[in-house]
Amino acid sequence: MEQAAIRPLKRRAKWNRTEFWMLLPSVIVLAAITIFPFFFMIYASFMDYRLDMDHPRFAGLENWQNTLTDETFWQSWGRTVVYAGGGLILQLLLGTGIALLLYHIPKFRNLFSTLVMLPVFVAPIVTGLLWRFLLDPTYGFYHWIVRQLGFDVQILGDPNFAMLAVIFMDVWEWTPLVTLIVLAGLQTVPEEPLEAADVDGANAWQKIFLVMLPMIRRMIVVALLIRSMDILRYVDTIVITTEGGPADATKTIGYYLMQVAFRFQDIGSAAAVGLTMLVVSTLMGRFFIKVLKAEEA
Amino acid sequence: MQLKKYSINTALYALMLLCLIWALSPILIMLMSSLKTQVNMFEMPPKLFFAPTFESYREMFFGRGDFPRFLKNSLMVSILTTIVCLFLGVMGGFGLARGGFKREKDISFWIISTRMAPIPAVILPLYLIFSKLQLIGTTTGLILAYTTFNLPFALWMMTTFFKDVPADLEEAAMIDGCGKFRAFWRIVVPTASPGIVATAVLCLMFAWNDYLFASIFTNRQTQTIPIAVSLLVSQSGIKWGQAMATGTVIITPMLICGLLVRKYMVRGLSMGAVK
């Protein structure tokens, strides 16, 4: 980190101008498509703004007041916490477990990790479609298995199980990413502390929990942050499987925003909701950068 | 001792097998179902061995669903987005990696928070602006929308890849009389080319896999394949055969591309956190 800061200084006279001009187009394009819309959204959140209106009317704090006093808004955030929290915990536990498994497996580690990785490439919309097929009450394979085990529930049609189902879709698709990040971390654990633990008579579990996992703590935090930002980003699986239902059981904040904006066409309130989402994701992004920088140092 | 080790290994492989079944069975079931007749598809438990039929694919490509147009739109939008973002990202990433700008930290933070912004929160203001500019339903609009996440991604990734290339390399070239830009183009870009390819593949994948932007910003003429999936799921029922075939067509190219740059995949998906 220190080095990186000093080295370019030396060459500043020679290099800086070229680099400035190389970066500039990206900054201009990115600003045009992100900063401008961002300010536009702030503006919209103070306007009485509907999709069919040409000239929105100033509404003061009305949208904010309506949004922040709307029970559905808070419930949607609450469900988001359940969805993200449940998904992240499962992904972290399973992902770390599978990474440890891959680390200890004597042969074919590369082949296995490649195969395990495949769900990551599946488009989220296809993941949703696929799980809808597997959970279908008349011809779904997973539903059939559940029924063989003695439970007869319509998984996606039951408010209690629908949330669990969409969580599992996310877990299925993204656990492999956690696995691969953690595995990459495990592979950097040096030999010496492990040998020292051997000499001290530690068993395999002690080595895992007392030596390896503490050493790759940062990697685990990185995996957690990447996943938490992405879990907020996507609503595709919910759109194609439950549409926020049944009885709003899977209506997360992202889905709620889409509904307020494009079904109820209340742009002003939707903008307020969107800004609350941006605040949360920005805070997480800041934390992510901090962790990364700490790692480089 | 030998026996104990043997039984531990057996347990490890058994667990691994379970993980593989969990991870791969949905994909395999989709692939198999896309090759089954409507009747076979719904048999429980699903048959592993059956006479494959390409009926679902035939109907998808030549039926009334207009699938070839979806495919063409998807290809066009994802490839164009990738070209634009990669071009800007490679130049900008180098600038950011080597510029030693005072505000480098702030710029990086801005870039990553742009990439991480929740899609619904990005769609809303873009929708309003695009409708004023009459970009809704156009390919240009969708490409611009994809640029909102692919450009910051390409910039961020290329910055981390260029930081891996030792600065001495281009300095040596410059001492030998190479211009600044030429040193970048002839020396640094080739050295970082695996990273550039991996970044390109991921940009392609993010655009190709997107559903939400496409569902808002396209019309009948410009719809992409993920939209075709949602159109097959309707009130009156789901055409599962075609849906499974469409799903297979969506994921196959991405599986192939992903495996080709496997080594860099984790690095890309973890935003450079894993080297």
Image (cartoon, rainbow, N blue to C red):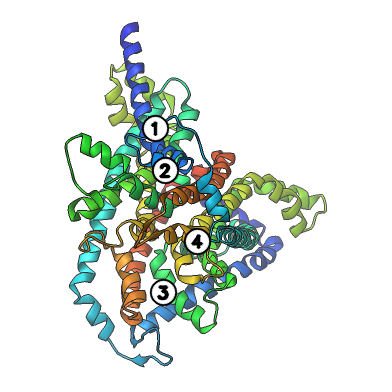
From the viewer's perspective, tell me whether residue A219 is left or right of residue B221: left
In front: label 4 or label 2: 2
Question: In the image shown, does B59 or B171 lie closer to the viewer?
Answer: B59
Q: Secondary structure at mark 1?
A: loop
Q: How far apart in space, not on screen, are marks 2 and 1 (Cα)?
A: 31 Å
Which residue is identified by label 4?
A: B108
Q: Which three-letter amino acid code belongs to the residue tagged 4? A: Ser
Residue A137: give x, y in percent of width and height. Answer: 26, 47
Are circles 4 and 1 on residues that touch, CB within 8 Å?
no
Which residue is identified by label 2?
A: A177
Q: Secondary structure at mark 3?
A: helix
Which residue is identified by label 3?
A: B124
Mark 2 packing: few (<14 Cα in 10 Å), some, or many (20+)? Answer: many
| Residue at image point 68% right, 45% down | B191
Are the numbered discs 3 and 2 placed on the same chain, yes or no?
A: no
Q: Quadrant of residue A78?
A: bottom left
Q: Earlier in the sequence, mark 4 or mark 1?
A: 1
Q: Secondary structure at mark 4?
A: helix
Q: Which three-letter amino acid code belongs to the residue tagged 3? A: Leu
From the viewer's perspective, tell me whether residue A67 is left or right of residue B83: left
In front: label 3 or label 1: 1
Residue B177: give x, y in percent of width and height. Answer: 83, 53
Q: Chain of mark 4?
A: B
| Residue at image point 40% right, 39% down | B40
Q: Chain of mark 2?
A: A
Are the numbered discs 2 and 1 placed on the same chain, yes or no?
A: no
Are circles 3 and 2 on residues that touch, CB within 8 Å?
no
Q: Which three-letter amino acid code belongs to the residue tagged 2? A: Leu
